[in-house]
Image: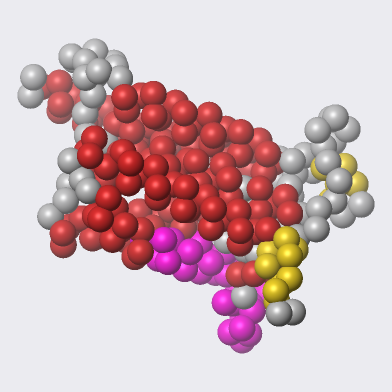
């Protein structure tokens, strides 16, 4: 792949970045799919839009703060650089924590079962990630180390792993799989039985599994001491989601 131009077009001397366009498109498409699927969870499109209006800004703020905190030596004392997301620098784990946490809090105030909403949102989150990752390509960031594979991209004058592409493909397949899983007829007590939380917990496990291995290829990872923070948090999320999955499935089976 050639080195891309991060600017899509310019209006009134303001550069409109591919990064922003792709992330915005991913969010809009994800919200639209949630609205269409809302009746499946006994929710309305108006309720979904209320969540989107609040949770999306919260997620973006969380993603930026997470990134800035792990690069504090770069941003300390420079407020305008802290808020300059046009240059890139959003950490998906921070966005997920802030966005999903805000959604759970709103569910408490609006008397909606959190797991119902999160099960609805999980496939769309994966789709938004699949699209948004291409923003990293246009910003020439979030890439891996040197490789001579035929699908390598150019970055810093050398051919490198397109880790954004690996994650984009995985997240799109995850989107399709979660839709299929959520549309399966409700089963009995077996491994495929349905229960609230199954979709969001499956998302948490499968996304974390991919991120753990893809992160090993990246050269720009945020660090916790000698460890890549994305690998550490992915491992923690995988274990927590697996434990919750087993617990909720057993609890649902015992009620049947």
Give the residue drawn at x 48%, y 64%: 60
**Which residue in the rendered view is the most extreme toward the front?**
12
Q: Quadrant of residue 23?
A: bottom right
In the displayed structure, 8 sits above or below 45; it is below
Foreground: 46 or 192? 46
Return the x and y of residue 52 as percentages of the image width and height.
36, 58
Residue 163 versus residue 208: which sits nearer the camera? 163
**Horizontally, is 178 left or right of 226 in the view?**
left
Residue 5 drawn in magenta = no
Quadrant location, the C terminus? top left
Task: Please say if 100 is above or below 183.
Answer: below
Residue 110, percent across and down? 16, 59
Q: Is residue 70 magenta?
A: yes
Left or right for 160, reference 187: right
Residue found farthest to the right: 157
Is there any visible trace of residue 227 in the rendered image?
A: no
Quadrant of the frame with the N terminus = top right
- The part of the chain drawn in magenta is 55-83
Give the residue at x 68% y 58%: 18
The one nearer the camera, 10 or 66, is 10
Residue 105 at what x, y percent from top left? Answer: 24, 60
Quadrant of the rendered image containing residue 239 = top left
């Amino acid at each position: 792949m050639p080195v891309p131009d991060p600017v899509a077009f310019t209006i009134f001397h303001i550069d409109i970045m591919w990064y922003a366009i792709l992330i915005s498109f991913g969010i809009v498409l994800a919200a639209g799919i949630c609205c269409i699927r809302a009746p499946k969870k006994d929710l309305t499109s108006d309720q979904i839009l209320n969540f989107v209006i609040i949770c999306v800004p919260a997620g973006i703020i969380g993603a930026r703060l997470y990134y800035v905190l792990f690069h504090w030596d770069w941003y300390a004392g420079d407020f305008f650089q802290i808020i300059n997301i046009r240059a890139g620098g959003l950490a998906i784990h921070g966005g997920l924590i802030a966005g999903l946490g805000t959604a759970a809090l709103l569910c408490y105030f609006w008397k909606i079962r959190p797991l119902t909403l999160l099960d609805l949102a999980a496939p769309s989150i994966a789709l938004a990630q699949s699209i948004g990752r291409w923003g990293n390509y246009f910003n020439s960031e979030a890439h891996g180390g040197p490789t001579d594979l035929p699908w390598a991209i150019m970055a810093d004058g050398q051919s490198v792993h397109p880790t954004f592409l690996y994650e984009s493909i995985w997240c799109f397949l995850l989107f399709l799989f979660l839709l299929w899983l959520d549309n399966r007829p409700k089963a009995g007590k077996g491994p495929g039985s349905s229960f609230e939380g199954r979709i969001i917990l499956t998302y948490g496990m499968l996304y974390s599994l991919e991120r753990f291995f893809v992160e090993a290829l990246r050269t720009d990872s945020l660090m916790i001491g000698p460890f890549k923070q994305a690998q550490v948090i992915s491992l923690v999320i995988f274990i927590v989601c697996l434990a919750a999955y087993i617990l909720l499935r057993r609890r649902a089976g015992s009620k049947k």
